[in-house]
Amino acid sequence: MKGKYIRLKTRKKDEPKKLKVFNFGLAILKSIQAFLVVSAHNFKSGSKNKIVLFITKERLLHVPIFFILSFYFMHNNLLSLEPKIILNRLMRLFIPYIGWPIIIWIINHYWNKKYNSHFAVTFEQLKLQLLWGHYFIMSYWFLWNLIAITILFTLIIFIFRKHSIFILQIVLILCYSAQYSGYYYYKIMKKFSQRPAKTIGSFFEDTPFAVIGFIFAHYKIIDKLQNNKIKTLILSILIYNFFDDYNIFVKIKHGLYPGFKLNI
């Protein structure tokens, strides 16, 4: 959907009012994917209703889309190489990544003592959670990768400057090569236990989505597609269902979000 302009109030009366673009299409997309996250983790349908089954079908789209959108919106901030902006971004990620595990770990002590439960309470368990984002808060591998990929992008942009887009495209190809060759799965993930393997393996799967989102923002692809948004929407749905129904690309047996299919 085409972005609409919303007027923002300025602090000083003598300053001109600023306009900011709010893209309702992307906002709706994020809401839909948030529902799919909840559905994928918590909903097990026993229904025979085709509409319910279609809505709750496990498509594994939420993680790819969130990575694409995250780095689409981070594009300008990362390219600016402003230390304050990038540090603020990393702090917003690190605070929940570190804070919530510590809070839950402390609460676990209380519950174990009061109700004789068996939640994670050892320092080793807390260390594994903080190190890999995958122990008693299982889904924090997502935050781990968001932080790691943000740092990777920042380093590439800082080192290569005007050639950074080209380097990121090479990184995308290398990640897909590692997936299709099985190298990251059999040579890297098999050497680690389950928790670090999940997190490190996801890094190879999620980095291409981040690169795609960054490229979309860099070349203003979404802005250009909005000129023909209805046709784009129809073609996108048809193309997605085509690739979802037929095994056009070789299916990679390992990992959750591997290969080109989810990117398309």
Image (cartoon, helix red, strand yellow):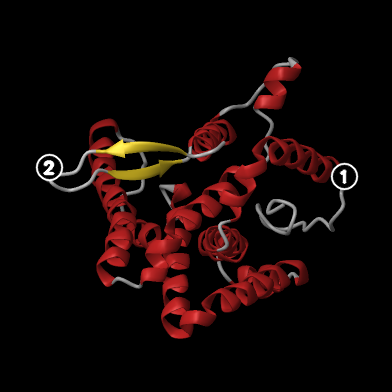
Disc 2 crowd rating (10 Å Cα; few below 14, some 14-19, many 20+) is few
**Residue at image x 22%, y 46%?**
16
Kind of residue at disc 2? Lys
Reading the image, the residue beneath label 2 is 13
Residue 132: name its quadrant.
bottom left
Dot 2: element? loop
**Is residue 149 visible to us here?**
yes
Residue 186: name its quadrant.
bottom right
161 displayed left or right of 209:
left
Spatial separation of the CA atoms under disc 2 and disc 1: 59 Å
**Is residue 132 visible to us here?**
no
Rendered location of residue 198, percent (x, y): 56, 59
Disc 1 crowd rating (10 Å Cα; few below 14, some 14-19, many 20+) is few
| 22, 114: nearer the viewer | 22
| 173, 79: nearer the viewer | 79
Rendered location of residue 136, percent (x, y): 41, 48
**Residue at image x 72%, y 72%?**
177
Reading the image, the residue beneath label 1 is 246
- Decide which of tag 2 and tag 1 comes sooner along the chain: 2
Residue contact at pointers 2 and 1, CB within 8 angstroms: no
| 75, 107: nearer the viewer | 75
Kind of residue at disc 1? Tyr
**Residue at image x 35%, y 73%?**
81
Q: Is 111 placed above or below 205 here?
A: above
Q: Is 167 placed above or below 141 here?
A: below
